[in-house]
Image: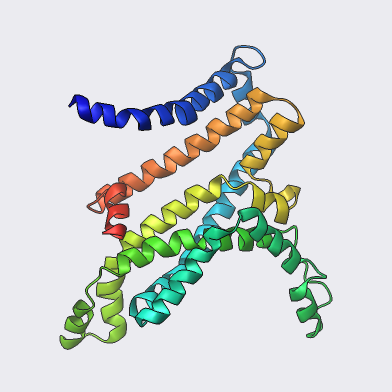
Amino acid sequence: MSGMLLALLPAFLVLAVFYFYPMLSVLVAAFTHPTPGLQNFEWFFSQQVNLDVLGRTLLISFWVMVVCIVFAYPFAYYMTIAKPARRNLLMLMVLIPFLTSTVVRTFAWVILLQDSGPIGAFMQVFGVEQLGIMRTPAAVLIGMAQVLLPFVVLPMYSNMAQIDRRLLTAAESLGASPGRAFLSVYLPLSLPGVAAGALLCFVMALGFYITPAMLGSSRETFLSTLIQGQVQGLGQWGHGAVIGLMLLLVTVLILAIAGIISRRAGGSVASMVGGSKA
């Protein structure tokens, strides 16, 4: 037992230094900066702009999750039925983005989506004078979806690769059409991977900073951008700490809801993620 505790000590120290201590500092700042009390929480809920930013963060993150699921599902499915050489090429396409910085990829979208960029020049051939995508929710959605798509593809593919395709053959031999066999057999079995990818995507999207800041305008401000403005721009550490706590609270609440839904479906969040990696 003591040997196991000793083995866990390095991980505990890392968590204590890089997670627990910063979280404790944020919690203390929320209640004490600039003076002790609940004035920072009162400020957050009394300012309509803060609630608007919270709602916008949730809404755009939700649509990013939906877009990623729509594009990731057929891509992951095709990877499971492709020949090994093509599957390896597709996997390489998924992994290459991890080798480049999010800032670099987002800046590439800045170049592509501006009116004078390649896409704008192409659209001018069809009479579209101005693309008008930059500094809009659509630009933020495109940039975030591109960054987060691999995080959705991988758990989906890992789950789908374990599904026995002979089940589809058996369903079709019993009279089910290919479409009915897919919807009745394959789709339910692939849902753990979909749930794992969707949850990972949504939680990661909530904390995005670079992409909304570079592709959006003040109307696409995220909670993370609001934190940066309060701390670096105004020096309001208490306000920034409260916003950070609200972001953490929303994330924990989403994970708790996902856990409840999963348990009612006969599993848990851990089993969903584990099932996608089994």
Query: Which one is nearer the viewer's eye here, 104 or 23?
Result: 104
Q: Is residue 30 above or below residue 48?
A: above
Choose top left, top right, bottom left or bottom right for residue 223. top right
Task: Indicate the position of residue 177 as horizontal and vertical percent values.
Answer: 26, 87
Q: Is residue 143 left or right of residue 229?
A: left
Choose top left, top right, bottom left or bottom right for residue 13. top left
Query: Could you tell me how many numbered marks the image carries?
Result: 0
Q: Residue at x 61, y 55 (%)?
A: 101
Task: Indicate the position of residue 219 as horizontal and vertical percent values.
Answer: 73, 49
Choose top left, top right, bottom left or bottom right for residue 131. bottom right
Q: Is residue 98 above or below residue 84?
A: above
Q: Is residue 259 above or below residue 12?
A: below
Q: Residue at x 40, y 43 (%)?
A: 255
Q: Is residue 266 left or right of residue 97?
A: left
Q: Residue at x 42, y 70 (%)?
A: 73
Q: Is residue 137 visible?
A: no
Image quarter of the N terminus: top left
**What's the image's color scheme?**
rainbow
Q: Is residue 114 above or below residue 265?
A: below
Q: Residue at x 31, y 45 (%)?
A: 260
Image quarter of the C terminus: bottom left
Q: Is residue 251 visible?
A: yes
Task: Indicate the position of residue 199 as horizontal and vertical percent values.
Answer: 42, 52
Q: Is residue 171 left or right of residue 113?
A: left
Q: Residue furthest top?
A: 36
Task: Indicate the position of residue 128 as horizontal and vertical percent values.
Answer: 80, 79
